[in-house]
Image (spheres, helix red, strand yellow):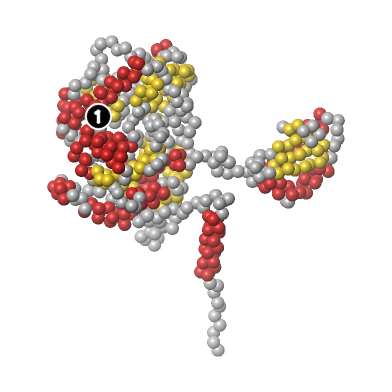
Amino acid sequence: MARKTKRRPNYSKHRSSRKKASESDSKKNKNDLTRPPVEPSPISIDKGELREQALERAKKRPIRERIKAFFRRETNKDYKELIINTEALERRVALIENGILQAFDVERLGEDRMVGAIFKGKVQNLEPGLKAAFVDIGQEKNAFLHYWDMLPGANNDPSIEIVRENKRKTPNNRVEAKSIKEIPKVFPVGSEIVVQITKAQIGSKGPRTTTNLSLPGRFLVLMPYAGQCGISRKIDDKAERSRLKRIISNLSLREGMGVIIRTAGQNKPERFFDHDLRILLQCWDDIEAKMRTQDSPCFLHEEPDLIGLTARDFLTDDIDRVQVDHKDDYNRLIENIEKITKKSKKKISFFDEEIPIFERFNVERQIEQTFMRRVLLPSGGEIVMEETEALVSIDVNTGSHRGDRKDGKNFILQANIEAAAEVCRQMRLRNLGGLVIIDFIDMKNKNDQRKVFQKMKSSMATDKAKHNILPISQLGIMQITRQRHDESNSSGVYEPCPYCSGRGIVKSPRAVSIEIQRKITSAVRRLKEENVRKDLAIKIFLHPSALRRFRGPDSKLIDRMERNYDLKLNFEAAESYHVENFKLVDESTNDEIR
C-alpha cells in the first residue's frame, strides 16, 4: 500500500503573487498623478565596482604624474577627482575618492552667497537678556550678533596656535568695546557697525554674525583687526611648524593685522605666502574704501562662487584630476588657478562627452542616496536618518544582514563600524549639523563600543566642520555636535508641506468627527443659555472625508445629538476645505459659532 503524503502549500507561489500585487499597486500609484509619488527604495551601490573604475582612470593619468607618484611612494594613494557640473539653475561640485562620493556642494545660480559676506549695518535693538544685538544689514531678517562676538579677538580658535603678536601701537579709529558691560554704551541703538556672516539664515533664524572679520586666501587667512598670527594645529610636523613660524615672522603685515597659515600652506615655499598676502590686502583695501564711502545698511564683500572656491580651497595637492563640463567655467577656473599656482593647471580638463558628467562618473546615483531616509550598508544593515531644525536622529538597524558567522556574533560590531563610517560620510554629503544622536545596535562588550567610537573619530578627522564626539553612553547612543554654516542640502530641494505645515501627519476623519461633536455640544449649551429659542439649526462646513464619517459610522451619534438637544444639523462639504478644518454657523443669524 502506497504511503499517503501530506501536500504542502506552495508558499513561494503566494509570495510571488503578493509581490506582483504590490508591484501592480506601486505602478498604479506611480501612474496616478493625483497621488503622491512612491517613496523610492534605498539604492544599493557596489563600491567595489566604483573603485575598479577609478583605478582604471588613474592608470590613464599623464606619464609624468605617474612617475612623480612612484618616486613619492604614492602608488597606493587614493585617487581623488573633482567633478564640476553646471546647469541652467545650479552648479554642483562633487569630490569622489576612488570613485566613491565623499563631498558634495551645490550653488543655486542667482542666489546670494551669505556665509563670509561682510556688511555695514545699523544696530536695531539690544537684548540684554539674550546678551545680543540685532543688526539691520539690508536683508530680509536682521542679523543676530552676540555680545561675545563683538569683543576683539573673541573668535580665537583652539585649533590655531598663536605664534606672533602684532598689536596696534597707535590709536585706531575703529570703535571697540573691551568688555560685555561696555557694549550698550559703545554700540547704542542706531550706531553703525561692520559685521561678517558666520552662519547663514536657517529656517526662522536670522544670520549669525561677528565683528571679528576674516578673509580666507589659498594659504593664509587675513584677520584685519586680530593683531595675532598663528598656525593650524592640523600641521603636526615639528620641523614644518618651525619653518612656518619663521615665515610668519618675515611677513610684512600692517599694524594691528593678523594672519593664520592654513593646512594648505604645508610644505609651500615662502613666496606663495607673500603672493597670497598681497591679494588679501588688496581685497581688504577695496572693502575699507566701501566702508568709508557707502551709507549703511550696505553690502561690502562677498565670498567667491563655487568656481572661485574650487580654485582656492578644494583644488589641493592631493587632488589628482578636475573635470568641468561648462566651457566658461573651465576658462574661469584656469584663470583663477594661474593666479595661485600654475602647476595645478595641468590637472584641469574640459569634459565634452554627450553623456552628462555626473552620470558618466556614477555620481548621480550616489547623490540620490543623500535625499533618502534609509541608507544601505555593505553587510546588509541600514541606517535611518531623520532631520529636524536643530537635531538629527540616526538609527542603525540590522536589516537583511550577511554576517560571516552563523551565530551572528561579529555582525553587530561589523554593522556598527560600517554605520559609523557611513554616518560621517552622510553628514558631510547632506551638510547636517547641530546635535546628532546615533542609536547603534546594542553592544554589551565595552571593547566593541570603544572600537566603534575610535572608528567614528578617525572617520570624522578629515571633516572641516568643527565637531565634538562623545563615547557611546549606557543607553547605547552616541552624541555628536557638528557645526553647520549653511542650510542642509535637502532644504534646498524640499520645502515644508503646505498642507500639514511640515508635520508629516494630518488628523484622521474620526478625530475630526470627535472634535466637531465636542464643539457642537459646547456651542448648543452656550446658545441655550443666551437665547430663549428652544429650536436650533446649525450648519457645519467640513471636508468630504469628515462628512463620510458622519453619514456612516457616526450617523447614530448625530441622530441622538439632534434628539437630545432639539437640534437640526445641516452639512456642507467641499474638497477645497482642509481635512482638519471646519466651521459652525448659526443658521438663524448666519453668525459663526466660535
| 518 to 412, vertically: above or below | above
* Residue 133 x/y as whole percent: 44, 20
Residue at image point 76% right, 49% down? 555
Corner quadrant of residue 172: top left
Q: Residue at x 51, y 69 (%)?
A: 12
449 or 455: which is nearer to us?
455
> Quadrant of the image for the C terminus?
top right
Query: Of 483 and 396, which appears nearest the observer?
Result: 483
Instruction: List x then y, in percent, for residue 350.
Output: 27, 46
Horizontal relation, residue 133 to residue 346: left or right: right
* Among the 4 quarters of the image, the one containing residue 465: top left
Dot 1 amino acid type: Leu
Please report the residue visible at 25 percent of the width from the left and 11 percent of the height from the top. 170
Q: Is residue 366 left or right of residue 315?
A: right
Residue 242 in the image, given as x and y percentages of width and height: 16, 30
Q: Within 10 Å of the Cα at label 1, are there few (<14), some (14-19), or many (20+) other Cα atoms?
A: many
Residue depicted at 53% across the width and 72% down the height = 10
Picture quarter with the N terminus? bottom right
Q: Which residue is mark 1?
A: 220
> Can residue 128 be seen by looking at this rendering?
no
Image spot of residue 567 (x, y percent): 82, 40
